[in-house]
Structures are given as C-alpha cells and as structure tokens.
Image (cartoon, rainbow, N blue to C red):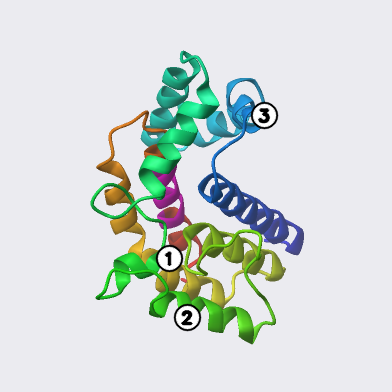
Amino acid sequence: MTETTVSEINETRASLYWWFATLLTKELDKEQLAMYFCGEGVTLLDQLEQEPDFTASVQKIKSALTTILAMNKPELELAADFSQIFLTDTKAGAPPYASVYLSKSGQLFEQPHQDMIDLFKAQGLTVDPEFNEPADHIAVQLDYLGNLIIQDVNGVSEAQINFIEVHILSWLEQFVKAADKVNNSGFYQGVCQLLQAYIKQDIVAIMPD
C-alpha cells in the first residue's frame, strides 16, 4: 500500500467521522436538509447503502427522509426529532454525552468530560466555544477523531485505536439503544445505527494483524 493510498483512505475515514459529527451537532437547516433529497447527501447515502453492514441503517435514514419530505415544513419536523432524542434525559431520549452513560451519577461533566479536556489540553486544543457543549459530546469526540486520523499521514496510530475503544465504543452501544427507544421519523436513529456499524467496521480494519 502506497503512502498516497493510505492518505486517501484516511481522508475518507476522517470525512465520514466529520459528517457524523455534523449530523449530531445540531439540527439541519433547510439548505442542509435539501442535500439529502437532491444533492451530495443522496450520493453519499447511496454509496454507503452498497456496503452490506450499512444497508439497513441507510435504508432507515432514507425511509425517514421520505416521511419527512411529505410534511409541510420538513426542516422543522426534523428539528423536533433532534430535540426529542438529544435534548432530553435518558428516560425520554438519548443525551449525546459519554458522562451520562459511563458515570455512576448519570450526570453531565463527569470523568469522561474531564478525560476529554485533559486530552485536549495535552495537545494545546480546546472545544469550540461557540458549540457550548461538554467535551464528551459525541460530536466533539467524532470531530477530534477525524482530526487525529488526518494527522496520521503514514497510516494508523495507536492513538486512533485507543481513542475509539476508550472514548467512543465504551458508551456508543448504550447511546444507540437509547436513541432507538424514541418514536419519531427514525432519521437520527438511523444515523446513530449507521455510526455504530461504521465505527465497528473501521476498528476491525485498522487493528494491527
């Protein structure tokens, strides 16, 4: 495998993690949502759907988009879905914070948040103040992972593997299950399921032989 090929693979991996981060950061606006009806979003979903491990979750996303498109104001319906799933507690939805699932208290700003802060500080990084969320938000973690991948121009570092296993896979399954319990269009449930399928495939692919 040439360095160029490794670089291309890492760019694709990073781009996908950034894509997931964008979807889980905040509600899609009207223009962003339109891309999933007749733009780049359609192309990406079609490509991902060809991978057997991703087919079911992509089809769930597409089915949700079809349902939403039939509504009067699709972007508002999807925003309501986002709020219902992510801007609530674990009884009603799926808060996107590692602390909620990994700490005894089930509250925000517990050890997983501090672990991320320490990781950022060690590298001279900070969470975007405009995001105004704890550092263990799933979108922050995925954005960081994308950057970590791009930095590894010659392949896959132990840091990548460790971060995925320790900081994401340690709570991702609980998060996805919590999202699955919510009854709405199913768009974000599909996104979470697709993320889980992708990251499980990715960690197997990058593990050393």
Classify residue 150 as left or right of residue 112.
right
Discs 1/3, front: 3
Between the residue at mark 1 and the residue at mark 2, the CA separation in whole angstroms equals 15 Å
Q: Residue at x 59, y 29 (%)?
A: 33
Q: Within 10 Å of the Cα at label 1, are there few (<14), some (14-19), or many (20+) other Cα atoms?
A: some
Residue 53 in view in this figure: no
Is residue 132 shown in magenta? no
What residue is shown with label 3? 31
Amino acid of disc 1: Ile
Q: CA distance from mark 1 to mark 3?
A: 30 Å
Q: Quick one: SS at disc 2?
A: helix
Which residue is nearer to you in this view: 197 or 72?
Answer: 72
Say whether disc 2 or disc 3 marks the residue closer to the N-terminus. 3
> Where 187 sits versus 90, above or below?
above
Q: Quadrant of the N terminus?
A: bottom right
Q: Is residue 48 left or right of residue 40?
A: left
Mark with earlier residue (1, 3): 3
Q: Which residue is mark 1?
A: 168
Residue at 46% across / 13% down in the picture? 70
Give percent across and percent down for residue 51: 46, 38
Task: Find the magenta span and give its range.
Answer: 191-200
Single out the mark in the foreground, 1 or 2: 2
Mark 3: amino acid: Glu
